[in-house]
Image (spheres, grey):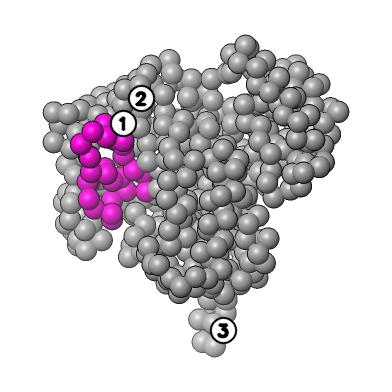
Amino acid sequence: MTTPRNDRDKAKEFVLKKCKEKEIKFIKMWFTDILGFLKSFSITVEELEGALEIGMGFDGSSIEGFARIDESDMVAMPDPTTFTLLPWRPTDHAGVARMFCDVLMPGGKPFEGDPRGVLKKNLQKAADLGYTFYVGPELEYFYFQNSEGTQLLDQGGYFDMTPLDAAMDLRRETVLMLESVGIGIEYSHHEVAPSQHEIDMRYTDALTMADNVMTYRIVVKEVAQKHGVYATFMPKPIFGVNGSGMHVHQSLFKGNKNAFFDKNDKLHLSKIARCYLAGLLAHAPEITSITSQWVNSYKRLVPGYEAPVYLSWARRNRSDLIRVPEYQPGKEKSTRIEYRSPDPACNPYLTFSVMLAAGLEGIQKGLQPPQPVEQNVFEMSEEERKSRGINTLPGSLYEAVMLTEQSKLVREALGDHVFFSFIQNKKIEWDRYRTQVTDYELKRYLPLL
């Protein structure tokens, strides 16, 4: 999954020319740590040509998340195909642009702890089998008055056309800004919970989309900050209302043909699609700590709030973990499956990696999915679910990490460096959480004990 040399040279020429035309002074070098936090440092345009040739050195310990190691020299190698101007920074003079970077060792070898590099490796495995992996994630988020609390901006609901308010203007400006940095947008609308919103990006290849997710999150926050409010991708910020998910629509293509489509199948799903779906279902528990990686993620994954808990799939049912959107005649390329447990605070590079790995294993092993469950799984009794073999996702970060730690598939997908560093990070987070004394405990127990 490397850019061919000729294409890279053309992209470099374009970047240098664009910087001169637009009077760009600063270029931000973006990369991502293991937990999915965007990292950045800036160089001046005078350093750009050298950076495009040999990269820029930086302290690699910043990529390890909570589990930082001693300082280590790394090289950020910018990907010139990701160059774009940052519209929330000055654009008329001394403008600012950015490029995503691959993280290399000083000798030029890819750094095994780079999440972007992890995704590239998994996409190469798919390419070796003849597939291109396409994804279309739907990121939900909340607007609050500030970062200190959860004071709402509106009381709207799902697809509500509320009277013109700050949130509607925020969403409109965010869409325009996303499009200005080259991210195609399909929909934007109010979500189910008050002050909850969603902007859907047009599906594309997984590497581009992972970069787009990182850009999307910062654009949403930048626009909100500009207007004096706060946007959050926290999975469950408010007790008693729906949390924020990141449903991921996904498909495999062979050339221009959607490998998930079969005109003769009842659901128009090919054998490849069904095996891929079966792989996702089979490995869902062990990949959940990656797709839902925070203590707070498991406050969202509970029955009753449209978040999936049970390992089932169906066409129309929105209580299932995997949904198959209905086929529309003439839209063969839109045939896809929707995996509904990830949340928007995940690391998209790692999340796309483990989902793809699970699906590919399903294809390679010829796994078959169980029968679809069109009934509401939440309303079934525990005995009925058990009789139908419907299991559940892990109920806490600790449970999820324990399953991941035993997973051969996740270890192979992430590579040893990211695998063990991620687990160490999550154990640190769990220990910090479990030793806290919460407001709930004080209100519940202090008057009684």
Residue 44 magenta-drawn? no
Instruction: Judge whether 269 appears above or below 39 on screen.
Output: above
Residue 412, how many percent across, how many down? 48, 27
Residue bearing the label numbered 2? 253
- Chain-order first, disc 2 or disc 1: 2
**Label number found at residue 414:** none
Residue 317 magenta-drawn? yes
**Label number found at residue 446:** 3
Residue 167, how many percent across, how many down? 53, 66
**Amino acid type, callout 3:** Leu
Look at the numbered discs 2 and 1 and tell me whether their residues touch, using CB distance below 8 Å. yes
**Amino acid type, callout 1:** Lys
* SS at circle 2: strand
Along the viewing direction, whichever of 286 and 281 lies nearer the viewer: 281
Instruction: Judge whether 186 appears above or below 307 on screen.
Output: above
Give me the C-alpha separation between circle 2 and circle 1: 9 Å
Judge whether residue 146 can be spotted in this image. yes
Along the viewing direction, whichever of 272 and 411 lies nearer the viewer: 272
Q: Is residue 184 left or right of residue 376?
A: right
**Amino acid type, callout 2:** Phe
Residue bearing the label numbered 1? 333
Along the viewing direction, whichever of 48 and 393 lies nearer the viewer: 48
Q: Tell me the magenta residue range.
A: 314-340
